């Protein structure tokens, strides 16, 4: 069976992505307007965003039984400005956890970070999601601080991690399926996701997070 195909996210993908978003993040899902705002900055010579979706190809004869239509099973987004990249979100449908799709999406974002000429890439991850942290460490991310109470309403701290970007040739190979992150128990925030608006980068709401990463009490409704 053919695996999901990664491609650029377009406006017609917002509806299925939003369905997946609400399923994975019922308490702090992004709104439709946030996705429209992100995609508005994803094209053109001054673009600062890159969003991709993972699409599972249709199976079976068209109009026949026993198959299914093409389906969005994952998505991811990157923001970039001033040589700094930020993983806005990565999400994978539950029936694709453990397949390595999250690692593929992260690899794709890192290639885009190189194209943006980012020197560093930041992300936030729940402090209790140790499996995801191990994955990011394999990609070269290192912990640099915390954001207190970043994930609401559970008041869970976020670990801030940073990657120094070299070039696409040096981007590590995606870890195997066993290393694909799955959500930790508790309020959603990193269901196969890398939530986070990094210090100094505007998120979908248009706000900018403070640069201090050790005692931040900013509550985050979104993943980034």
Image (tube, rainbow, N blue to C red):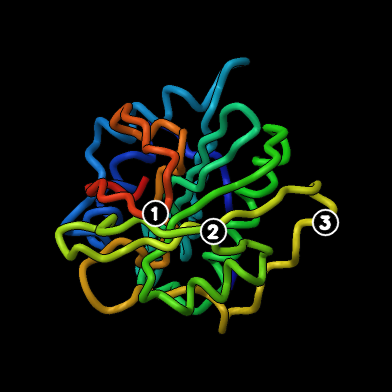
| Residue in view at x 40 percent, y 49 percent | 196
- Spatial separation of the CA atoms under disc 2 and disc 1: 16 Å
Q: CA distance from mark 1 to mark 3?
A: 24 Å
Q: Position of residue 126 (x, y in %)?
A: 37, 66
Quickly name the residue at label 2: 144
Q: Nearer the viewer, mark 2 or mark 3?
A: 2
In the rendered image, residue 44, in percent from the top left (x then y), is placed at 58, 17
Horizontal relation, residue 16 to residue 192: left or right: left
**Mark 2 or mark 1, which has the lower sequence index?**
2
In percent of width and height, residue 116 lies at: 67, 32
Numbered marks: total: 3
Tag 1 residue: 195
User: Is residue 73 shown to the viewer in this render?
Assistant: no
Depth check, front residue: 2 or 215? 215
Q: Residues within 10 Å of mark 2 (few under 14, many from 20)?
A: few
Please, what secondary structure does the residue beneath circle 1 have? loop
Mark nearer the N terminus (2 vs 3): 2
Residue 185 in sight from this viewpoint = yes
Q: Which mark is residue 184?
A: none
Residue labelled with disc 3: 170
| Above or below, 130 relative to 123 | below
Q: Residues within 10 Å of mark 3 (few under 14, many from 20)?
A: few
Q: Are marks 2 and 1 in contact (CB under 8 Å)?
A: no
Q: For the point 44% across and 45% down, which residue is it?
A: 88
Question: Circle 1: is it few (<14), some (14-19), or many (20+) Cα within 10 Å?
Answer: many
């Amino acid at each position: 069976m053919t695996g999901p195909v990664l491609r650029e996210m377009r406006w017609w993908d917002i509806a299925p992505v939003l369905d997946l978003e609400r399923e994975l993040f019922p308490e702090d899902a992004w709104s439709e307007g946030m996705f429209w705002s992100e995609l508005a900055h994803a094209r053109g010579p001054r673009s600062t965003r890159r969003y991709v979706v993972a699409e599972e190809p249709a199976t079976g004869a068209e109009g026949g039984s026993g198959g299914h239509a093409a389906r969005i099973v994952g998505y991811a987004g990157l923001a970039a400005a001033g040589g700094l990249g930020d993983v806005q979100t990565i999400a994978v449908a539950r029936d694709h956890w453990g397949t390595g799709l999250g690692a593929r999406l992260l690899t794709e974002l890192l290639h885009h970070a190189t194209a943006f000429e980012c020197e560093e890439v930041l992300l936030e991850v729940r402090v209790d999601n140790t499996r995801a942290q191990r994955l990011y460490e394999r990609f070269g991310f290192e912990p640099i601080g915390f954001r207190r109470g970043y994930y609401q309403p559970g008041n869970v701290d976020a670990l801030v991690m940073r990657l120094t970007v070299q070039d696409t040739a040096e981007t590590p190979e995606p870890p195997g399926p066993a290393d694909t992150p799955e959500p930790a128990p508790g309020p959603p925030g990193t269901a196969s996701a890398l939530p986070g608006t990094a210090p100094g980068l505007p998120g979908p709401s248009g706000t900018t997070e403070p640069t201090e990463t050790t005692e931040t009490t900013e509550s985050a409704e979104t993943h980034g």
